[in-house]
Image (spheres, rainbow, N blue to C red):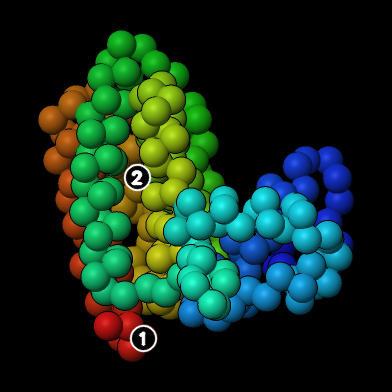
Amino acid sequence: MAEPTGSLSKPESLSRQIYATLREGIIRGQYAQGSRLAEQRLAEELAVSRVPLREAVPLLERDGFVRTLPRRGTVVSTWSVAAADDLFDLRLYLEVGAAVYAARKVAAGADTAPLAAALERTRAEATDGDAYQVAQARAGFHDAIVELTGNALMTTLMRPVSGRMTWLFYLTTEPDSPDPAAGNGQLFRAVTSGNERMAEAVAYARIECDRRESLAALRRIGVE
């Protein structure tokens, strides 16, 4: 889905479709950071009524894509170096623990095929996908580690983190950025070894590597 425009169909919840369309548009920069999302204009653009649009906005706000401000209404969230740093701090607490938990599950016989499929998608998109698809695949690999834990609460907590990761990965991926599949491959091998300490160490190192690269890239594009 390259453009967040056009009428939406009915198979799934219309508000969820609107959420997904606007989310992609925000990540791709088609709705600029700090810009106001005017309800009437969006309803006309997406060919929907205002009711499902109003239902989609809280989902976007929950996941950190928009904010509702007095007298301005709904505006697209903005990135800062501090906000990105906060995201990586949260990732350390959530994802390092998830990697340990997932390795424990693997040692107990958990199926690693979904994680392998997520890694393969990262490799495929890094070769053939556009920046948005690459960002989605990168975040999706980390989602798959959390899902491997079998912990429903952890999966729920990961959802908004994953969305913000996708957005940040999209913003900070540069032509000469390291191949994301290489780092994900290291983490895959650590988790699927079933060795909790190895999984913990590699997860921590990968997140800190992402932090350094992402914060530097944000500064290069003028984000402070």
Q: Do callouts 2 and 1 mark residues in contact (Cβ within 8 Å)?
A: no
Task: Tell me if residue 3 can be seen.
Answer: no
List x then y, in percent, for residue 95: 28, 41
Q: Mark 2 is on which residue type?
A: Gly
Q: Secondary structure at mark 2?
A: helix
Single out the residue that lies furthest toward the front. Answer: 71
Q: Residue at x 34, y 45 (%)?
A: 185
Instruction: Give x and y (percent) for residue 178.
Output: 34, 66
3D distance between C-alphas at marks 2 and 1: 28 Å
Where on the picture, by quarter, is residue 144?
top left
Q: Which mark is residue 221?
A: 1
Residue closest to the eye, 122 or 8: 8
- First reached walking from the N terminus: tag 2 or tag 1: 2
- Residue wearing tag 2: 185
- Dot 1: element: loop
Q: Residues within 10 Å of mark 2 (few under 14, many from 20)?
A: some
Quadrant (top left/top right/bottom left/bottom right) for the N terminus: bottom right
Residue 19 relative to residue 199: left or right: right
Q: Position of residue 118 (x, y in %)?
A: 49, 40
Give the residue type that dot 1 points to.
Ile
Q: Is residue 127 above or below residue 30?
A: above
**Vertical position of residue 43 compared to residue 60: above or below:** below
